[in-house]
Amino acid sequence: MALITRQRVDAVTILTLKRPERMNALSKPLLQTLDDEIEHLCGDPQTRVVVITGAGAKAFSAGADIDEQRGFTPDHAYAHMRWGQAIFDRIEACAKPTIAALNGVALGGGLELALACDIRLAAGSARIGLPEISLASFPGWGGTQRLPALLGASRALRMMCSGELMTAQWAHQAGLVDDVVEAEALMDHVLTLAQSIARHSPDALAMLKSVVRTGLREGRAAGLEAEARGVAELWGTPEQKAAQEAFFSKKKT
């Protein structure tokens, strides 16, 4: 059985994690399949936006497949963390905008996967948390870095130190998810947003993502320089000229 299914709706591609019997736990084969799918879609000219969600009504993903970690040595744990980090880094670096549709629980590595996406939308029934502390550990696939960058150190440390499961409504108020809607309306809401993004220039979207990441990674001065260079690089391209002409033509009518 396929670990991930792919569905295209116009220029939006939806990847669905397909281990509902394990609450879409991120096994090594599933993660490798996800990495392969992202690599393909990031180079696919027919895809302008990528959506990641989970199969079933219970879970986006309950996190790493803990059964696979039985018998890990410290060296095994280190290698596994670095491998997962690299996969999520590639999702974050994808030139296409990515949206995580949190249809159910997003825990541990499942939440870290969502954090690697650009935008997060959640069903009202979703529960969100990083419970690794209950196993005398902590997030190892980028959560200790991405969550504080998103929420600030205090709120992020509260989540990670307590291991509490947060409601979708709390996550929305904290800025962890962008919208919360009824579960049955989630995918329609996600597709509406994804298609509104997909209408825009893929080159401009890719440059925008790159500029934002530069500022977050290297600071404001580097971000402003990247911003100016990015606008200059896009200026005068056939796509930019056509969009500008269409704007002025519309303004005249």
Image (spheres, helix red, strand yellow):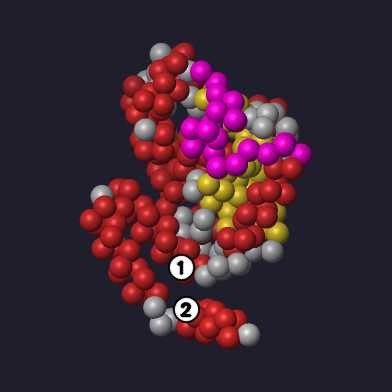
Locate residue 30: give its quadrant.
Answer: top right
**Quarter of the image that includes the C terminus:** bottom right
Residue 61 drawn at (x, y percent): 60, 32
Q: Is residue 183 magenta?
A: yes
* Residue at which label 2 appears: 240
Residue pushed farthest left? 221
Is residue 18 visible in the rendered image? The answer is no
Residue bounds of the magenta highlight: 164-184
Is 100 located above or below residue 196 in the figure?
above
Q: Please state if 86 lies on the left or on the right of 102 as rendered.
A: left
Are circles 1 and 2 on residues that touch, CB within 8 Å? yes
> How many neighbours does mark 2 have within 10 angstroms: few (below 14), some (14-19), or many (20 or more)?
some
Residue pushed farthest front? 252
Q: Residue at x 41, y 26 (%)?
A: 155
Task: Point out the tag, 1 or 2, that comes first from the N-terminus.
Answer: 1
* Residue at which label 1 appears: 204
Residue 160 drawn at (x, y percent): 42, 22
Query: Disc number at residue 223?
Result: none
Mark 1 residue type: Ala
Is 140 located above or below residue 224 in the figure?
above
**Quarter of the image that includes the N terminus:** top right
Q: Secondary structure at mark 2?
A: helix
> How many neighbours does mark 1 have within 10 angstroms: few (below 14), some (14-19), or many (20 or more)?
some
Decide which of 187, 181 is in the foreground and name it.
181
